[in-house]
Amino acid sequence: MHFTSEQRLDDGVLEREFTFGEIPGILWTPGSASASAPAPLILLGHPGGLPRMYPRLAARARHAASDGFAAATIELPGSGDRPRDAAAEQARADLRRALQAGESVSDDIVDRLVLPLVDKAVPEWQALLDALLSLPEIGGPVGYSGGVISIGTRLAVVEPRISVAVLFAGSFVPRAIFEEAREVTIPLHVLLQWDDEGNDRQSALNLFDAFGSKEKTLHANMGGHTGVPQFAGEAAARFFTRHLS
């Protein structure tokens, strides 16, 4: 991990951009974080395109910092300035064509688009976690917040250092991920926009039902993909405070 810039925001949060290998990322730490009082960590998932997602990610990170948590994110494979994958680009084009034609999206398209992304992204998040937890001002426990929900699901299964997750239901989910969801046991808080134009509501409900966690909460709100109400974010923040503080 190589830090490339840093700035102290007006609320005292330290924002540092970094590269992890060739992967760009951002780390936010609260002003209270120190070697003697390391902050718990939240990994911020997103659908890709770090510059485009920055305003929403920064707002989430600053909210987390106000609760005493550090937050970090990295660019997804094939997004932003990272190299494109021809197979993924073809799957994305097939997805757009199906949606524009009003057709149902086939399992084949979803598998080709999502599963290779999960296979590449999850080891990167795990390696990033190694680097972040080596910083003296960052400690456990660790949570995951956001999408792509298939990435969050896989991480919840394979990464024992993640003890709690807030998952955003807003992306297509391969059938194989439903089977993995049965192995998830950590506490979950799932956010669902009821009228999300790019999400299969029934698939999201089926995935929630599949999760094996004894503690799991579904917070469903009326509205489209980007219409998550402020109080839904506040409920997710309280969930993290209950489990990470």
Image (cartoon, helix red, strand yellow):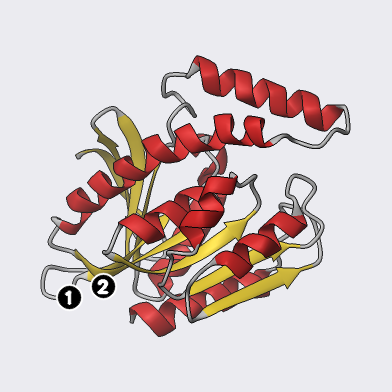
Looking at marks 2 and 1 on the same chain, the residue that comes earlier in the sequence is marked by 2
Question: Does 103 appear above or below 155?
Answer: above
Instruction: Please rate how many residues cluster around mark 2, counting C-alpha atoms within 10 Å: few if below 14, some from 14 to 19, many from 20.
Output: some
Q: Residue 176 or 12: which is nearer the viewer?
A: 176
Mark 2 or 1: in front is 1
The number of numbered badges drawn on the structure is 2
Percent position of residue 125, x then y: 33, 46
- Residue 3 in view: yes
Quadrant occupied by the C terminus: bottom left
Q: Which amino acid does label 2 sit on?
A: Ser
Q: Describe residue 34's horizontal placement relative to residue 103 as left or right.
A: left
Q: Are marks 2 and 1 in contact (CB under 8 Å)?
A: yes
Q: Residue 125 or 60: which is nearer the viewer?
A: 125
Quadrant occupied by the N terminus: top left
Question: Does 166 appear above or below 150?
Answer: below
Q: Describe residue 38's horizontal placement relative to residue 16 as left or right.
A: left
Residue 37: numbered disc:
1
Q: Mark 2 points at which residue?
A: 32
Please tell me in which quadrant of the rendered image residue 110 appears: top right
User: Could you tell me how far apart the alpha carbons at marks 2 and 1 are, in whole angstroms?
Assistant: 8 Å
